[in-house]
């Protein structure tokens, strides 16, 4: 490998591959290179390139891959004001990484809060038009802002901004220790759909509030006339249960009761699926009965939520005969995502100390080893390995090695088969 100089260039003057991939905006190649052996200096240099290009999504990947934002001098990064004006919450978050957060005094953070609020209250398009003075038509698209969420991107003349100022405002307020009212955080979320980053920022923040006032506000959304508000309330209930400390936690019990009651009468498939996903992390007959009531629902999203919830949290004692029959049916579902969810749940019903798993569930999972889709075959390998089923070994060998760019995800499934093989061989050699 060519030696690199202090500026990151190789001896022949070429940029390191990771830096070049970031400069080209090639997300998939960046993921592949981060999976391979990498140089810490190169990762940190690539982070600086990503931030200067206003690619918060790539900066996030690089931070997860080991980049040290502190290796970038202040003059090598855009200002926090530029990032806030651009409207990308992920870019702002990268600049506020823990390793460089102390570069920004509280006074500057308060200024950034006010700047984000001014964009949010004016409206992104109106403020963009005011700043450019352009009479042209605004071009609006939807883009990824981080690995999971999207934002709107608006271009007017030569200037492009994103509409994540509400999410930025939420983040900076939290950093400053400011408790924004429930109603205001809700408003920032529901002016967008549930895939928007502003929605995510608000739900995560509110679901960690454990006071009675917040819970009363959450439950009140159940009867709201606007479907977006009801969906927001359903997600808050789901996350409230998910982030509880234990099943016996008062907050968890209260959330499960509310989810069960609401799911019994909800008819909207999207909302119902959200409610049922909230029951998936709570192992118990109460939640299981609510899930089983919708096992044959015509909407695939609802069936996927049921499949995801049955037999979870390592509590096989809660998998009744009726739930087992439902999983067997869902393992043969026409919908790919339903089959995957059912296979994952079926795998995790295996008792940790069992010599073998459930033969019927194992056979149903083994049938998925011939599924045309690789991601189905991978989760079938995982499920069979948990059931101590020999068939996982050969199937894992056929699927190895993991695909470039998907190594982290695929190794979760394939490693289960390798662990089973070690257990098996250890018993055999003994």
Image (cartoon, rainbow, N blue to C red):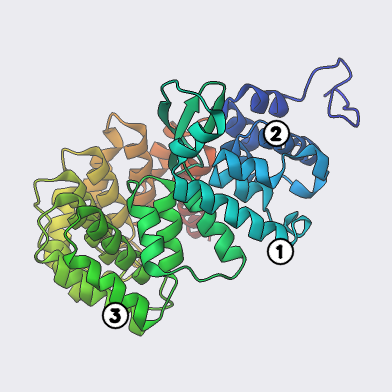
Residue occupying image coordinates x 73% and y 37%: 48
> Residue 151 bears which disc, if any?
none
Residue occupying image coordinates x 51% and y 35%: 130
Element under label 3?
helix
Q: Earlier in the sequence, mark 3 or mark 2?
A: 2
Compute the Cα span from label 2 to label 1.
Answer: 23 Å
Residue occupying image coordinates x 28% and y 63%: 233
Compute the Cα span from label 1 to label 3.
Answer: 39 Å
User: Is residue 60 in view?
Assistant: no
User: Which residue is identified by label 3?
Assistant: 253
Q: Which of marks 1 and 3 is nearer the N terminus?
A: 1
Give the quarter of the image for residue 6.
Answer: top right
> Is 347 rendered above or below residue 374?
below
Compute the Cα span from label 3 to label 2.
Answer: 47 Å
In depth, the one of 327 and 240 nearer the eye is: 240
> Is 144 rendered above or below residue 234?
above
> Residue 106 bears which disc, if any?
1
From the image, state whether disc 3 or disc 2 is nearer to you.
Answer: 2
Position of the N terminus by quadrant: top right
Query: Does residue 294 appear left or right of residue 39 in this picture?
Result: left
Local crowd size for mark 2, using a 10 Å CA cut-off: few (<14), some (14–19), many (≥20): some
Local crowd size for mark 1, using a 10 Å CA cut-off: few (<14), some (14–19), many (≥20): few
User: Which residue is identified by label 2?
Assistant: 52
Q: Are marks 1 and 3 in contact (CB under 8 Å)?
A: no
Residue occupying image coordinates x 31% and y 65%: 238
> Is 26 rendered above or below residue 114?
above
* Position in image of residue 401 (x %, y %): 52, 33
Counting the numbered discs, the total is 3
* Position in image of residue 151 (x %, y %): 44, 39
């Amino acid at each position: 490998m060519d030696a690199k100089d202090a500026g990151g260039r190789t001896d022949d003057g070429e940029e390191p591959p990771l830096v070049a991939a970031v400069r080209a905006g090639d997300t998939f190649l960046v993921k592949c290179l981060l999976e391979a052996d990498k140089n810490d200096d190169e990762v940190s240099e690539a982070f600086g390139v990503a931030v200067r290009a206003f690619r918060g999504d790539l900066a996030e990947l690089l931070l997860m891959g080991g980049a040290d934002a502190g290796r970038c001098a202040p003059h090598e990064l855009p200002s926090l004001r530029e990032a806030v004006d651009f409207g990308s919450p992920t870019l702002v978050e990268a600049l506020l990484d823990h390793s460089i957060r102390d570069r920004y005094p509280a006074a500057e953070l308060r200024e950034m809060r006010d700047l984000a609020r001014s964009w949010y209250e004016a409206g992104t398009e109106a403020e963009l038009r005011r700043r450019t003075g352009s009479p042209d038509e605004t071009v609006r698209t939807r883009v990824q802002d981080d690995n999971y969420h999207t934002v709107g991107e608006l271009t007017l003349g030569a200037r492009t901004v994103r509409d994540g100022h509400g999410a930025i405002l939420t983040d900076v307020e939290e950093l400053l220790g400011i408790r924004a009212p429930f109603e205001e955080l809700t408003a920032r979320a529901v002016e967008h759909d549930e895939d928007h980053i502003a929605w995510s920022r608000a739900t995560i923040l509110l679901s960690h509030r454990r006071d009675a006032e917040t819970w009363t506000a959450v439950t009140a959304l159940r009867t709201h006339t606007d479907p977006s508000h009801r969906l927001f309330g359903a997600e808050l209930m789901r996350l409230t249960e998910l982030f509880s400390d234990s099943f016996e936690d008062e907050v968890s019990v209260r959330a499960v009761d509310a989810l069960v009651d609401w799911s019994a009468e909800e008819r909207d498939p999207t909302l119902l699926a959200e409610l049922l996903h909230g029951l998936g992390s709570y192992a118990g007959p109460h939640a299981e009965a609510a899930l089983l009531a919708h096992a044959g629902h015509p909407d695939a999203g609802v069936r996927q939520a049921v499949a995801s919830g049955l037999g979870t949290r390592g509590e096989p004692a809660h998998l009744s005969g009726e739930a087992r029959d439902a999983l067997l049916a869902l393992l043969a579902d026409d919908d790919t995502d339903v089959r995957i969810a059912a296979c994952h749940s079926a795998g995790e019903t295996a008792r940790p100390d069992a010599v073998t798993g459930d033969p019927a569930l194992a056979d149903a999972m083994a049938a998925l080893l011939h599924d045309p889709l690789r991601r189905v075959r991978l989760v079938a390998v995982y499920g069979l390995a948990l059931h101590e089923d020999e068939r996982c070994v050969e199937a894992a060998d056929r699927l190895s090695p993991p695909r470039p760019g998907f190594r982290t995800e695929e190794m979760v499934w394939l490693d289960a088969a390798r662990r089973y093989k070690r257990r098996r061989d250890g018993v055999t050699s003994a």
